[in-house]
Image (cartoon, grey):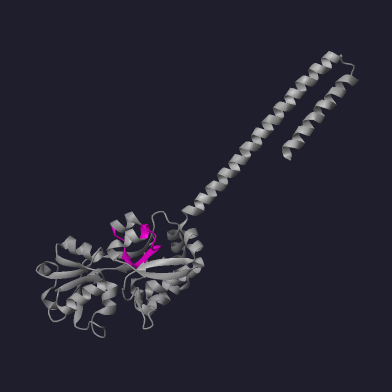
Amino acid sequence: MKKSIKKIIALLAVAALGLSLMACGSSGSDASDAADTDADAAVSAEAEAEETEDAEADEAEEDADTEEASDEDSDMAYVQDKGTLVVGITDFEPMDYQDEEGNWIGFDADLATQFAESLGVDVEFMEIDWDNKILELDGMTIDCVWNGMTLTDEVTSSMECSNAYCNNQQVVILPSDIADQYTDADSMMDLTFAVEAGSAGEEQANAYGFDYTPVQSQADALMEVAAGTSDGAIIDSLMAAAMVGEGTGYSDLTYTIGLNDEEYGVGFRKGSDLAAALNDFFAECYEDGTMESIADIYGVQASLIEQ
């Protein structure tokens, strides 16, 4: 429609110019030459206008393609479109564990549930083999790893990680009746340890040169010590505080020395925009007291990192 109007305007302009030349008494030859010249100019102007319109249309199409590609690359858009945030976890009290009804609870589980709500989606918890967490994430069977995950070099290089939100240590677990015989790492060199495969505990066992056996989870590592198939275990201090010692299921075990200092973070696919969204969520939860309230429930308030 726009092109037709432009053609009509161009023709009218030529006709008006021709009449004007005739009224001024120009010769028929001069008028014809002028009309031809102006007609050529009008056609040229029309062609230029059409080229401009085509260029604008191409640019608009490119912008639409760019916007569509941006949406496709957005992890947040992907999660919101499918309506579910799938969280990769292991059984790790007090961060992620099941209540009597089989519901996943814990400091991490409760925060993950609220974060999903802030995105307008449901949360789904999926138990994973911790040693395969990066493969699970990149394979898109899960959307994040949120399970008291230590921010190791391997993790930060392979995932888009949130800000650190909890302090932690790897600690040695031993039977209470022999713990006083082992007061430092050097005295433990003749012990055998159970550690979760792919965990910060395994990393520390390697760093200290301990003899160890990798198992599927930290809970399994504790079971190995309780059963006497391993002398000790190396697990997270937050888990040790919740599961080892008087009043727990492992009252005959105790935690002794700390092997390092570390921090927890949440991991998303590399380049994911969900990491920045979670950082904003953490900041809001810390400021309004939500994070501390949840931490109080699970006894991890002393480990919180200011957001």
Q: Which residue is most to the left?
A: 190
Is residue 305 visible in the rendered image? The answer is no
Residue 176 is left or right of residue 82, and the answer is left
Residue name at image x 82 percent, y 30 percent: 12
The N terminus: image quadrant: top right
Residue name at image x 44 percent, y 72 percent: 113
Where residue 210 appears, x then y in whole percent? 14, 65
Is residue 288 visible in the rendered image? The answer is yes
The C terminus: image quadrant: bottom left
Is residue 146 inside the magenta stretch? Answer: yes
Where residue 102 appears, x then y in whole percent? 37, 80
Residue 43 is left or right of residue 266, and the answer is right
Report the span colored magenta: 137-152
Is residue 160 inside the magenta stretch? Answer: no
Q: Quadrant of residue 295?
A: bottom left
Judging depth in this view, the residue of 7 and 203 nearest the camera is 7
Judging depth in this view, the residue of 283 and 125 nearest the camera is 125
Where residue 250 appears, x then y in whole percent? 23, 82
Residue name at image x 51 percent, y 67 percent: 120
Q: Quadrant of residue 59?
A: top right
Where residue 54 appears, x then y in whole percent? 63, 37
Residue 58 is left or right of residue 121, and the answer is right
